[in-house]
């Protein structure tokens, strides 16, 4: 009995030894020899860091035949750099290439032999350097040979000889009025037209050989008070809208090449028709009616439907193209679609832009990126314009322009930027954020990286 008890204790001791070793090598049920696991590499800091590459290295790991390298843009390794997810490396260093400037990267290495893979090394962070943007050798409108490059303007900015005027004439081949060709400005009180600002803009364009895109005939945000609070009958309301469209298109026939006939008719939340005063008074087919009025007044002008969040809000995107399908099915004259493109440094993705763009191309529409700006501080997490955000903005603009530049010639119209200098941008008021830098020029009229991104998108 005594002897048996002694054996039982031995068995317990040996048993716990085995279970301890298998704990140390969790998940591996092979023999004790396995307890000496393949060591993980001691990774070094990056060297030879420049704007698009860096070099990493590590000392040899005993018993390793090979290594595997991960490089990602986040430290949880969810978004890998293309080609650097578990990349096999047989030497003790690697030049990581094809990177973006001024961007954070994270890397780690594992050792491998024929029977096992080590744990990962520590994770090391490295930031690529800012690249040297060469001085541009061409202006935007010259570099863009197949579509116009537009600018949103205010009449007061169009003073001959000003810095603004110089840049506008050099770089841009089209203009849109930022707000002075909207109904609250042109017909502020019923029947009294004020053409002064609109005429100044159109005359400037004609004098300088610049295209004019008319913006915008029917927009709930710019309905003058007398129309927004209309007291007459629905038929009278509709007649007012028709009179307005007719008056504007007649005045600018042959001078304004294209118009946003209806702006922002679709709701963000559910893709339904926005319940604007126009819909309430003219019915669900108010959009079709407005396009008809426009076509009757000018048979040659290009007629656009214009809206925002077309690339990012899928419900809205579907609704907008359903609306356009209905117009086309009923032979309503529509020539094009405008994507406003008030976007962010990190959204939309290239794929999102392409998906939306394809829908316009499939329908034989002209496509206008009509109000481009790229917010770099949508979450208000920076107080100065960092190099990292400047680069991200540049890359986003490059993506936008290169997707646009790749569409067929017959679908092209223009990319219009919504303001020249950062401090003139409407987004500062719109989002109550003075820490925004959404445009191609800084407040001193200096070219930004975003401008370089536009040019690179055209290459
Ligand atoms: C904005 C202008 O930038 C502002 O100056 C004006 O006060 C309000 O309108 N979508 C549009 C544009 O279609 O007309 C808007 O422009 C921005 C959002």
Image (cartoon, rainbow, N blue to C red):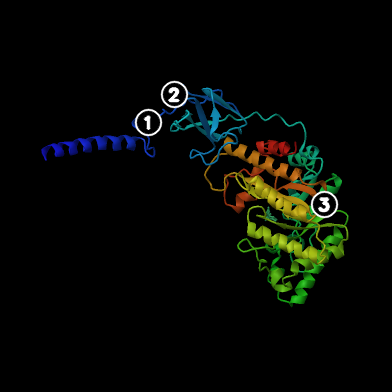
Disc 2 element: loop
Q: Is residue 21 above or below residue 423?
A: above
Residue placed under numbered mark 3 in the picture: 202
Q: Is mark 2 within 8 Å of ligand 1?
A: no
| Number of numbered discs | 3
Q: Secondary structure at mark 1?
A: helix
Which residue corresponds to the image point at 61% horizontal and 53% vertical from the top-left? 430
Q: Residue visible at 75% across and 70% down? A: 285
- What residue sits right under mark 2 in the picture? 63
Q: Is residue 204 visible?
A: no
Residue 306 is left or right of residue 42, and the answer is right
* Quadrant of image for the N terminus: top left
Instruction: Tell me which corner region of the image, top left, top right, bottom left or bottom right, holds residue 225.
Output: bottom right
Q: The residue tagged with tag 3: helix, strand or loop?
A: helix
The image quadrant where one finds the C terminus is top right
Q: Nearer the viewer, mark 2 or mark 3?
A: 2
Q: Earlier in the sequence, mark 3 or mark 1?
A: 1
| Ligand 1 under 8 Å from disc 3 Cβ | no
Query: Which residue is nearer to you in this view: 412 or 375?
Result: 412
Residue 218 in picture, x, y percent from top left: 74, 63
Q: Nearer the viewer, mark 2 or mark 1?
A: 1
Q: Earlier in the sequence, mark 2 or mark 1?
A: 1
Corner quadrant of residue 281: bottom right
Q: x%, y% of residue 159? A: 77, 44
Mark 2 and mark 3 lie on one chain; the one further toward the N terminus is 2
Q: Is residue 438 left or right of residue 4?
A: right
Using the image, tell me which numbered label, if any, was put on residue 34: 1
Numbered mark located on residue 283 in the image: none
Q: Give how far apart the Cα atoms at labels 2 and 1 are.
A: 13 Å
């Amino acid at each position: 009995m005594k002897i048996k008890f002694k054996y039982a204790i031995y068995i317990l001791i040996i048993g716990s030894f085995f279970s301890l070793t298998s704990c140390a090598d969790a998940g591996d049920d092979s023999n004790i020899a396995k307890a000496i696991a393949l060591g993980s590499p001691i990774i070094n800091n990056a060297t030879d860091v420049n704007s698009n590459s860096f070099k990493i290295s590590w000392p040899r790991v005993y018993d390793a035949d090979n290594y595997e390298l991960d490089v990602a843009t986040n430290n949880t390794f969810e978004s890998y750099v293309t080609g650097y997810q578990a990349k096999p490396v047989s030497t003790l260093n690697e030049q990581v290439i094809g990177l973006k400037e001024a961007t954070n990267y994270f890397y780690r290495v594992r050792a491998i032999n024929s029977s096992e893979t080590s744990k990962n090394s520590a994770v090391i962070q490295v930031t690529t350097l800012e690249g040297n943007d060469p001085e541009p050798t061409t202006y935007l409108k010259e570099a863009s040979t197949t579509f116009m490059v537009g600018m949103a303007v205010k009449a007061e900015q169009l003073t001959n000889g000003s810095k603004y005027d110089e840049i506008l004439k050099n770089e841009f081949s089209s203009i849109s009025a930022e707000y002075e060709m909207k109904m609250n400005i042109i017909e502020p009180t019923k029947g009294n037209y004020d053409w002064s600002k609109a005429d100044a803009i159109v005359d400037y364009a004609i004098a300088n050989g610049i295209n004019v895109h008319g913006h915008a005939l029917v927009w709930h945000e710019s309905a003058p008070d007398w129309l927004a609070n209309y007291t007459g009958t629905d038929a009278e309301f509709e007649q007012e809208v028709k009179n307005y469209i007719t008056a504007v298109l007649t005045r600018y026939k042959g001078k304004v090449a294209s118009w946003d006939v209806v702006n922002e008719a679709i709701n963000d939340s559910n893709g339904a028709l926005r319940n604007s005063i126009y819909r309430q008074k003219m019915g669900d087919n108010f959009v079709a009616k407005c396009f008809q009025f426009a076509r009757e007044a000018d048979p040659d002008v290009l007629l656009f439907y214009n809206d925002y969040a077309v690339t990012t809000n899928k419900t809205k995107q579907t609704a907008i193209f359903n609306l356009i399908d209905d117009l086309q099915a009923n032979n309503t004259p529509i020539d094009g679609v405008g994507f406003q493109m008030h976007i962010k440094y990190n959204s939309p993705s290239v794929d999102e832009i392409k998906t939306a763009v394809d829908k316009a191309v499939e329908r034989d529409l002209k496509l206008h990126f009509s109000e481009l700006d790229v917010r770099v501080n949508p979450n208000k997490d920076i107080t100065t314009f960092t190099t990292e955000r400047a680069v991200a903005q540049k890359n986003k603009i490059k993506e936008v322009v290169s997707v646009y530049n790749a569409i067929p010639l017959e679908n092209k119209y223009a990319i219009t930027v919504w303001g020249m200098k950062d401090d003139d941008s409407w987004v500062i008021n719109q989002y109550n954020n003075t820490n925004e830098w959404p445009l191609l020029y800084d407040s001193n009229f200096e070219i930004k990286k975003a401008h370089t991104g536009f040019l690179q998108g055209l290459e």
